[in-house]
Image (cartoon, rainbow, N blue to C red):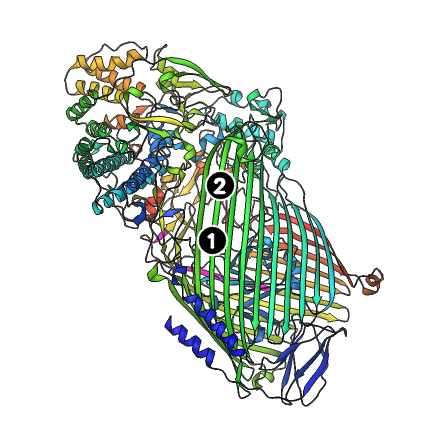
Amino acid sequence: MKLKYTTIYTIFILSVFSCDDFLDEVPQTLVVPEVALATEADIVTALHGAYSILNDDGFAMEHNVIADAATDNGKVPSDVESAGTSSDRIPYAYSLDLNDQFTANELWREAYQSIAAVNNILDRLDEVEFGVEFEDRVKAECLSIRALLHFSLIEVFAQDYNYTSDQSHLAVPYIKKSTPGAAVSRNTMAEVYTELFADVNEALPLFQSSGDVLTMQGYRSGGSIYFMNYYAALGLRARLHFYSTDYPSALNDANEILSGPFTLEPTYTVSQYDNDGEVGDFVDQWYGLAPILGGEAIFQLDVDSDDGNFANRSLIDIYTANNGNAAHAVSQDLIDLYEVGDARLAWYLDEAATPATDLHVFKYPGGLGINADAHHFPVMRLTEFALMAAECEVLTAGDEGRALTLVNQITSRAGASAIASSGTQLQEDIITERRKELAFEGHRLYDLKRLQRGFTRNDCLLSNGNCTVSYPSDLYAWPIPQYETAANPAIK
Amino acid sequence: MKRIFTLFLALLFFMSRHAYSQGDVTGTVTDIEGETLPGVTVLVKNTTNGVVTDLDGKYKLKVQTSDVLVFSSVGFKVVEVPVDGRSVIDIQLTDEVLGLDEVVVIAYGETQKREFTGSLATVGAKDLEQTPQTSPIQMIQGRAAGVLVEDDSGAPGSVGSILIRGAGSYGDNGPLYVIDGIPTSNFQAFNPNDIASISVLKDAAATSIYGSRASNGVVLITTKKGKAGKTKITFNAQSGFSDLENPNNFRLMNASEYTDYYREAFSNAGLDSELLMPANSDSLNTNWLDGVLRNGKTQLYEVTASGGSDKATHYMSASYFKQQGIVIGTDYERYTGRLNLNLSPADQLNVQFAVLGSFAKNDLQFADGGRSGIYSGSFNVAPTASPFATAATPLNLNGLGYNFDLPSNAGHNPLAAEALNTRERQTYRALPTAKVTVEPIENLVLTSSASVDLAVSKENAYQSKYYYAESDNGLGESITDYEVSTNVNFTAKYDFSIGSDHVITPMVGTERYRKSYESQSSESSEFGFDGIPGVGAGSILRDISSDYTAHTLVSVFSRVNYTFQDKLFLDFSYRVDGSSRFGPENRWGNFYSVGAGFDLSEESFVKAIDAISFLRVRGSYGIQGNYQIGDYQWRKTYNSNGAFIVPGGGNPGAQPESPGNESLQWEESVSSNLGLDFGLFKNRVSGTLEYYSRGSDALLGAREISRTSGFASFVDNIGDIRNSGMEISLSTVNIQKNDFTWSTDFNITFNKSEIIKLNADSDTTSTTTTANIKGQPFEQWFLPQYAGVDPATGQPLYRDAAGELTLDENEAQRKVSGNSALNPDFYGGLTNTLQYKGFTLSAMFYFKYGFKVYNDLKQQLSVPGRNNNTAANLARWQQPGDITDVPKVDFNDQSSAQFNSTRWLEDGSFIRLRNVSLSYLVPSEYSQRVGLSNLTLSIRAVNLLTFTEYSGFDPNVGSVNEDDDYPVNRTITFGLSASF
């Protein structure tokens, strides 16, 4: 009897150790990488994960808001509500009260997050054999995403390409291998440009050799404009040349895009839209939840804040005041550039505020009330390259007639007067037209840097001296976020 | 592994028997008033030969002439009586006054306090009764040295948190909670009145046997058990009310102050103040904060039954608790049931069953922070605005009569938030346990126990389609959480003596534990009908997610206690833990402790001093561990949940979730403890003096890394911290006369924390307001130094690196700026208890000194963005020459108030009258007339008064900042307890 008790207990106790796999808890809603990146379908899933980061508030919002708000296009609404000033709506983009807390925190974080995601995939492609075309296409997309994001980082965090004559000024770390915990230092502008060209130039032939194999093999749907493609990579290379003021090369790439399968939106029309009591006149070609400007779209984002990854706000939330608290308004300096009757004035709407004083950006009205934060955003569209080609023709002392033809396609479709100037005035007019047409698409600041110009805001309420910025300016290279400098001793 | 096995088997077979037979001794045990005492343990000293007294306080035991009998019972002094050949020994037990011989609950068993070599603080039933708190954690505040208790929140149903002997970890600093031997954190399930005692284990000797989970201490909660005897039924009723304490009259601006303030803000910004804020804006004055606050109410009804025979005892309780919070729309209701059953069908067999079940319903704010919260939102709204729609309100901002034309708070109307929106959480909990004890051969006690700890919570929320501050057109949310832990353990204990001087008690055991957590949530918008809170009633379903995590722990442990001549006590414990939270290479951890205690009372040099009635020294050393990190952190993982769909829902994506870290290992803390326990003047003065040092190595924590890696942080062993300090506990009986007793309990803790090492790449890791710096205490405030206002311009001034004044925020130098709430210079409690006949008056002061609070509510209420501001800003700079520390208000300068600096840092030191309790035991001649054996009436107060210089509501903030979270309340409760 007593011996039996003892024996039973001993067996019980021993049984605890008989199953060591009790300690091998395996996650059920997460996947370990050996499993996550095993098949072609897995690789595509991981690749789409990298794209989805582009829709979040770093690349899709901060990079673009900064480009306009931090220049003579932007304005803090004078009827600003307190909500509009809290830092998640980046009011410092306008006021330029920059420091390591008030800077492009999300862009830095998310750009590198996406870069790490594509680096993981590139590593995996080296380890596992997949189909040749498949591998080429995935590699091309990864390399071009990596270049696109590094380029967006230097636009914000570094001075312009020609800030030093030998490009020895510091830009950002170019990350080709992501190592958690490593201290990483900034590369010079020259080094970053070398890597940018290396990635894009490797990607372009791979795009050509593989074609849209991922769609053809059924790995994705939704159309090529949502993914990096040959022309998007080419457009990126055109920008690399353009913003490093290599205008002849920029012209070459822009011309190749212009002769590609895209057509300029022939005309801008305006209609009134009414959804659940929200009423406004908007440009038809920019309205709605479907892809916008279908004929000229090269690369677009399908932003939907309901995807839950926003640390801050979506672009549309900051610009359009869907909730009645827009944090950024449109400067009268910009409005005054449009003629009366220019269809593009319908991009700006006087929100129902009391007292009504400011215009807000309604260039992307989305569905106006239906899924209030959702909108499409054109990262690259044909118009940009038409204007780039026009400017390059003038700057390289090329064909001014062609430059006029190109730029007047843009003015005429909006119902504005044609440009007829020449020489430096023509260059100025093209730059102004670029400012008007590409307003709030994330270009103005980067163009001012390229041109090494400051700016003056006449419609300006600031008392901190930032109504005028003259080149060169520290405000043209945003501070590295505090979280980075605190965790990475190699960064300065 | 093999080593432990050998040890275990050796212990199992190393048994000696030494039983002698002799005559019986019988007797009756009574208390000081002559009432018989059932359930008293009567043991032959240094053996396990013993019985428990029956219903009539009688016992019968086989003994030898030379044996000594030990009588013990919780709440009474232990008495030792030599048999000396007698066959009848009647004993009267006296109340345990000073706790030296108290029976205390320790890891995997219980012992007498004087034999225990570790450091332990016990809060007994009598103290617990004085504190009408809703959570066991809050009951300990101020009553145990070395234990820092924070309330965290005043929200109905909130629990509070504990820090034992300083912050020793970067992550979760909380202790391990063990309820009747079962590790759990399910406090909300409890009716605190079911708790018999709480023991806080503080040093290695006390905690090491809990191994990997013990580095931040262990809190053992023991629930009430039945005692053999006539079934006793007790009915308790309590009712009370509560409000917000506001020690320094913090307030917001009223309408006319607000109007003047913003007219000045607009005009300082060069704007047309007449257009933006006409002078007559203050025609209406709404006090929004008053509007959302109310007097809270609490009610508790409880019935307990306990009793039984010598073969079976029971304790049963059922309770209903209702708390109406001090913020409108927040309520808590809880039903609990508990059953403790103890069966001893045979001498060698004991079976215990316990079941705890509870149901709680919690009405919460739809959002409990920021603009949309009821409480937090009320700070922002302009006092000039009306809560209700008027003729001037635009139609699309008139939601069921509420005004949403509130630009000062982004449209959010806190009164409408309460009236139109709902959030209700229902929580179901169950904790069944079974424990079987057998004694197959004499002195060998085998115990096995198993338990399941279950919590299911279901939360439904609805934001009205007429809540016009949001554009979702109705928003529904549903969240369901399941938490399940299972625990199985076996222990074997064997007692034996070598001669009469040496008693050795070895114990071995094993344990298996698994905890899983699962949650599901979904949201929907675009509701057709209003007020139907189900997610399914919305037309667009979105944000559907589920999560599942789990971890396991397997352990073997052993302990040997050795007693020499009942004055030298030694113990040794050893435990091996394996956890799924670490990679295969670093899965197993070894933890051990040694402890020694020496009772000097009987030594001649002590006996020679009359004043000393008790004196003991003790010390311990050992290693405990910590594994408080998330599940699966060592693994590299990808996350593929629905958040990564691009574009338009067609293409699922996956992102790297965690970088993993295979070299992750157990956090270890090496602690040593020196203690001196003393009793003076016939134990009229008694106390404990302790010095401790606790070095935590290989701290587990999120290490911030360069974001260029794609990750913000990874879990790593990130550094070492040492906490050292002194604890003093003192109890005195100041007056003890016939009917009158006055006693005082005092405790104080001085803890010093120091960061010894940081493995991060930089010397300092910091948030925007705090930093961990080598050589400094844990989490110091680290802020730019505010230097007041420039009298010429009204601009805020800061100190730069050279210590010079600067207006430029970018030049302002961040510096170490003081202790956070986790590291006060000292803290403690002072309790005075007066007893006169049936009256007991007790008052406890809780104090905490030498720390700073970051008043971010004040910061938020100093941003001039049309939101209301703190009345403290009435002292702002207005014209050149003004000397003030509040800068000029300028509508276009909203960033200077948002700039983090010492401007918002305040001394948090306070003394708080935490508890006052007055109770009256109605004399039995009266209570018996109405058929009651006991009738007690009481009035009890919590947080009655606070003395502090802190300008906000509560300096005792749970987190390090005071923000707009639910405030702690002041409560007064009336109670009645009747026993049949």
Which of the chains bears the disc numbered 1? B
Figure quadrant of residue A195: top left
Q: Earlier in the sequence, mark 1 or mark 2?
A: 1
Name the quarter where the C terminus of chain B is drawn: bottom right
Between B20 and A6, the one lying in front of the other is A6
Which of the chains bears the disc numbered 2? B
**Residue B721 horizontal/vertical position (percent):** 41, 60
**Residue B347 horizontal/vertical position (percent):** 62, 76
Label at residue B516: 1
Q: Which residue is mark 2?
A: B521
Amino acid at pointer 1: Ser
In the displayed structure, does residue B102 sit left or right of residue A204? right
Query: What whole-number distance in Å separates the C-alpha atoms at marks 1 and 2?
Result: 17 Å
Between A402 and B850, the one lying in front of the other is A402
Range of residues picked out in magenta: B746-764
Can residue B527 be seen here?
A: yes
B747 in the magenta segment? yes
Please rate how many residues cluster around mark 1, counting C-alpha atoms within 10 Å: few if below 14, some from 14 to 19, many from 20: some
Mark 2, secondary structure of its residue: strand
